Structure formats: structure tokens, C-alpha cells
């Protein structure tokens, strides 16, 4: 492969959002720099299988079975006195970073864009050791930031909010190195279809309210219980459930839907999420950064359920404080809360206005354009 204008976008599949952000930036780069060689790499896909199971599988295991431990770990790693924990974490990562180091070194890129902190840390180590001479930029994927994203040298950090910028700069990066862009979303989310056109695309009843229940890329959480509560909500609403890549969950939800006395559509993995979201009156979901950004881009309010302690509880706080979401703490209250909201057009419109105000559908384009300028300038370190 030629080393001329090679751009690497590095992610890690600890959740679907990091790869989605990577693909969104890739799409913008291919339009803005068609002559460039652009590659997207999931660094866990080329890592040691045991490390991959521990890193990605451990994350999902904590989310499913010990969310409180996940929250404790997230908060603990965000403290300034966490150097011992950092040393252990970096030591484990260093035992498994060689495939990534070899891959990056062989490509001799002119620019590296990270949508996860793991490759950002590996690239920073390579640069400090003199094994790599190219700028890197890092795209954070939640509405608040965390010190684990900060790795010197990094020419630019892209963050979702002004608060995220302030927090990153408190860990060392200068303010001019941090740009508030929003979270990059896929290109379809920049296309305003309108609710009626979106419902026609999805073959839904144009006149009845639609509630969209999202299970996330891995189908984590009490989805069956949430669907049960939505099935008994008052009013004529139609329900759509996106089961993602979890085929076993999809089959269970299909059986549940077939026994329902309400119109329910169960969808597996889809590349038409922008149509389903724009067709919806409400999105019931965990507040992952990418999911929230996509919903806001569609101007649809969120009903937050079951946030993962740590980054998702922080996302939840941001959305609630800015009036773009409501939160349901107990699944048994989901039906009444959603039913009340659907029957209150004025309140629903207030939430929509707030969602549209927070939306940044052009984030991927802003990131790509700025990253290309940095590539042309060369490394600042």
C-alpha cells in the first residue's frame, strides 16, 4: 500500500457506537478527500483472542451482570490519583498492543483518527517512542468526557459539548486543541424526511403515534419487560422494536409481539435507523452517546431507561438538564409515562424543540474537514 495520503481511523468494538462514529467520519472523509487512502480498523479485531474476550467481553459482562461495578470502575478511573490503576491497565494493554503497532507502522499514515481511547493511547506511545511521525486526532463519543481520552501527543480532541471541552482541558490539553463539534452520526441522519414520509418508507400507519424501542447493538437490558409494559399503554400507538445483532432476542421479541393485541414490528439489524427514528414520536432507549446523537439529529425526544452507570448516566443528566428527554426509573411505569406524554402534544413539542436545539448532524463533516487541515500541517509535536 502507498503511504501517500493514507488516513487510518481506529476504533475498538467495546460497543457499537465507536465503530458507528468511525464509519460516519470515514464517509465524510471520502467525500472531502477522494484521493486519500482511508482505512477503518477495529483494533480488537486484530488483537490476541484472549485479550479481545477480556476487553470487549469483560465490558459487556459488567454491563449485563454488574452495572454497579461498571459505574465504580468508570468513576475510579476518572480520578487524578488513579496512577496505580493506570499502570496496571497500561501494562495489560502493552502485552497485547503489538498487532496494532505493526499494522499502524506498516501503513505509514499521514493522519490517524481515533474514535476510542485504546488506539489513541497506543498511537501516543508510538509517537513518544519515535516509532511514528504523523498527527493524531481523537473523537470522544459521549456528552461528557473522561480523563482516559487524554493522551499526549494529540493534535486535536473533538467533543460533544462545551462542558466536555472544559473537562478535557482540565487534564492538560490547551483550549485551542479541543473543538466542540458534536458526536458524528451516519449520513442518513442529516436528511430530513419528515414524519409522514419516514412512516411511508417504513410501511407504518401515518395517523397513529409510533414508539420506537431500541435494544442497542448487543441487545443489553430488560428489553422483554420494556416491550411488555409498552404493549399495555393506553391509546392506539404502534410499536417498533429494533433488536440489533441479537438474533436470539429478536426471536423472543417476535413471539411476544405475535401474542400482542397491538401492532408491533420487530426488526433485526438495520441500516435504515434514520428512517425508523424520523418516523417515531418517541424513542425508548439506553442513552448511549451515538444513539442519543442520532435521536437528536432526527428531532425525536428520548425516554431514557436503564442507563449504564458511568458514561450513560452522565449522558442522561445532560439530556434531562437540556429538556430533550424524560427518564423512567422503573419499567412498570413505562406504559403510563409514555401514554401520558403521547396524549400531551404541547409537552411533546417542547421536547422536540429541545432535541432539535441540541442536534449536531454535521459533526462528522466538521471533524473530517478539520482533521484534513491538521494532516496538511503535519504533526505539532
Image (cartoon, helix red, strand yellow):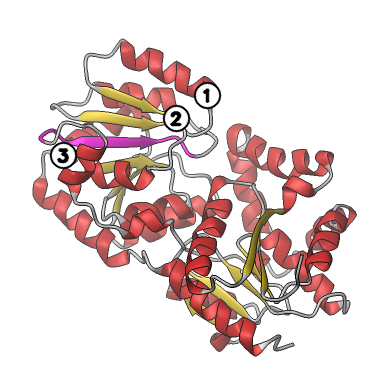
**SS assignment at label 2:** loop
Q: Are marks 1 and 2 in contact (CB under 8 Å)?
A: yes
Q: Mark 3 packing: few (<14 Cα in 10 Å), some, or many (20+)? A: many
The answer to whether 162 appears left or right of 18 in the picture is: left
Q: Separation of disc 3 and disc 1 at Cα? A: 30 Å
Relative to residue 13, is residue 141 depicted above or below?
A: below
Q: Quadrant of residue 111?
A: bottom right
Counting from the top left corner in percent of width and height, residue 139 is at: 57, 67
Identify the disc placed on residue 268: 2
**SS assignment at label 1:** helix
Is 9 a magenta residue? no
Mark 3 = which residue?
Answer: 342
Relative to residue 176, is residue 166 depicted above or below?
A: above
Counting from the top left corner in percent of width and height, residue 175 is at: 55, 86
Q: Separation of disc 3 and disc 2 at Cα? A: 26 Å
> Residue at left 55%, top 66%?
145
* Comparing labels 3 and 1, the label whose residue is closer to the camera: 1
- Taking depth in this image into account, of 6 and 304 the one nearest to the observer is 6
Mark 1 = which residue?
Answer: 247
Mark found first going from the N terminus, 1 or 2: 1
Counting from the top left corner in percent of width and height, residue 129 is at: 88, 77
The answer to whether 148 appears left or right of 237 in the picture is: right
Which region of the structure is painted magenta? 207-216
Looking at the rendered image, the quarter that the N terminus falls into is bottom right
> Residue at left 46%, top 28%?
222
**SS assignment at label 3:** helix
Mark found first going from the N terminus, 3 or 2: 2
Amino acid at each position: 500500500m502507498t503511504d501517500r495520503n493514507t488516513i487510518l481511523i481506529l476504533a475498538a468494538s467495546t460497543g457499537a457506537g465507536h465503530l458507528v462514529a468511525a464509519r460516519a467520519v470515514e464517509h465524510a472523509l471520502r467525500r472531502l478527500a477522494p484521493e486519500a487512502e482511508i482505512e477503518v480498523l477495529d483494533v480488537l479485531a486484530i488483537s490476541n483472542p484472549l485479550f479481545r474476550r477480556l476487553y470487549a467481553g469483560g465490558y459487556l459482562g459488567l454491563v449485563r451482570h454488574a452495572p454497579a461495578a461498571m459505574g465504580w470502575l468508570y468513576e475510579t478511573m476518572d480520578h487524578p490519583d488513579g496512577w496505580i490503576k493506570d499502570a496496571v491497565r497500561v501494562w495489560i494493554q502493552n502485552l497485547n498492543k503489538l498487532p496494532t503497532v505493526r499494522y499502524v507502522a506498516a501503513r505509514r499514515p499521514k493522519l490517524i483518527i481515533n474514535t476510542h481511547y485504546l488506539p489513541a493511547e497506543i498511537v501516543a506511545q508510538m509517537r513518544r517512542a519515535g516509532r511514528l511521525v504523523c498527527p493524531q486526532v481523537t473523537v470522544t463519543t459521549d456528552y461528557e468526557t473522561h480523563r482516559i481520552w487524554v493522551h499526549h501527543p494529540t493534535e486535536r480532541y473533538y467533543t460533544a459539548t462545551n462542558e466536555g471541552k472544559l473537562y478535557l482541558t482540565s487534564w492538560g490539553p490547551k483550549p485551542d486543541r479541543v473543538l466542540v463539534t458534536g458526536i458524528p452520526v451516519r449520513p442518513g441522519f442529516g436528511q430530513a424526511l419528515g414524519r409522514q414520509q419516514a412512516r411511508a418508507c417504513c410501511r407504518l400507519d401515518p395517523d397513529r403515534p409510533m414508539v420506537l424501542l431500541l435494544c442497542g447493538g448487543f441487545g443489553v437490558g430488560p428489553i422483554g419487560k420494556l416491550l411488555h409494559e409498552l404493549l399495555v399503554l393506553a391509546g392506539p400507538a404502534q410499536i417498533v422494536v429494533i433488536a440489533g445483532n441479537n438474533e436470539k432476542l429478536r426471536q423472543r421479541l417476535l413471539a411476544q409481539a405475535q401474542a400482542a393485541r397491538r401492532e408491533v414490528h420487530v426488526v433485526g439489524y438495520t441500516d435504515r435507523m434514520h428512517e425508523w427514528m424520523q418516523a417515531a414520536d418517541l424513542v425508548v432507549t439506553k442513552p448511549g452517546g451515538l444513539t442519543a446523537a442520532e435521536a437528536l439529529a432526527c428531532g425525536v425526544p428520548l425516554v431514557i431507561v436503564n442507563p449504564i452507570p458511568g458514561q450513560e448516566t452522565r449522558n442522561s443528566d445532560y439530556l434531562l438538564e437540556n429538556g430533550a428527554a424524560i427518564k423512567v426509573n422503573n419499567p412498570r411505569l413505562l406504559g403510563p409515562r409514555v401514554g401520558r406524554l403521547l396524549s400531551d402534544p404541547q409537552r411533546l413539542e417542547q421536547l422536540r424543540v429541545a432535541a432539535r436545539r441540541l442536534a449536531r448532524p454535521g459533526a462528522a463533516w466538521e471533524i473530517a474537514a478539520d482533521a484534513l487541515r491538521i494532516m496538511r500541517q503535519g504533526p505539532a509535536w
